[in-house]
Image (cartoon, rainbow, N blue to C red):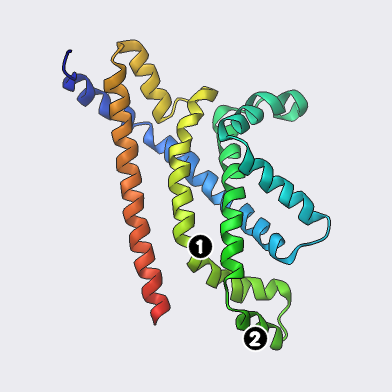
Amino acid sequence: MEGLNLDYMLGLLPVLLSYVPLTLFMAVTGMAFALILAALLAVERVVRVPVLDWFVRLFISFFRGTPLLVQLFLFYFGLPQVLGFLAGINGVTATIMGLTLHFSAYMAESIRAAILGVDRSQWEAAEAVGMTRGQMMRRIILPQAARVAAPTLVNYFIDMVKSTSLAFTLGVTELMGAAQKEAAGSFLYFEAFLVVAAIYWILVEALSFGQRRLEILLNRAHAR
């Protein structure tokens, strides 16, 4: 058995690192849209608007109950056949759409649980001073729920970063796609995928460290 080709791995590292910004761009953009959508879905699941609540539950059930890869294929290959204006959609846009909708379904349930976890006296106090339901959510409930849900939402972002690796199936040359191409050209698959695994590992560990620091800061602020 031959040893690892360390020279190849060291030479490959800067090549793959140049694709990290695209990976992070897709994850950050998807997270931003997913947070907005998840907050809206969570609020609706709490207030339960008739008819709309049925569609929201169907949305959450579908995107939680089907694999992300299948959803990406639906957006990239399927929807353009049904909706003509999506004929020019590229892999990056389809990936961001898939990440947004897939993770918003999971995040909505976490935010909903955090909202329902806010002490009932907070709701009653807001109603007592004459706040509308919208004002109550914006000023009182959601800020408190955000502190509870934040660590879980960071976990979803970490999962989202790793899930961007599926974008290569849509022809996107991001971190995983670049590793696949380099490995196909050199036939050094183990070395190439070992390097890409190390990069993802470092990214996740950095985000996990940030998550732990965030939890400390939030708990410290709440203790005051």
- Image quadrant containing the C terminus: bottom left
Image quadrant assignment for residue 9: top left
Of label 2 and label 1, which has the lower sequence position? 2
Please name the residue that numbered disc 2 is placed on.
125
Judge from the rendering whether residue 219 lies leftward or rightward of residue 84; answer left or right: left
Under mark 2, the amino acid is: Ala
- For the point 70% across and 46% down, the residue is 59
CA gap between label 2 and label 1 equals 22 Å
Judge from the rendering whether residue 56 lies leftward or rightward of residue 145; answer left or right: right
Dot 1, crowdedness within 10 Å: few (<14), some or many (≥20)? some
Instruction: Indicate the secondary structure of the residue bearing disc 1.
Output: helix
Looking at the image, is 77 positioned above or below residue 163? above
Please name the residue that numbered disc 1 is placed on.
149
> Closest to the observer: 162 or 26?
162
Looking at the image, is 63 positioned above or below residue 89? below
Q: Which mark is residue 51?
A: none
Judge from the rendering whether residue 42 lies leftward or rightward of residue 69; answer left or right: right
Q: Can the viewer see residue 87? A: no
- For the point 40% across and 27% down, the residue is 176
Query: Residue lying furthest bottom in this view?
Result: 128
Q: Can the viewer see residue 84? A: yes
Give the percent coordinates (x, y) of residue 104: 60, 49
Dot 2, crowdedness within 10 Å: few (<14), some or many (≥20)? few
Give the percent coordinates (x, y) of residue 165: 45, 32
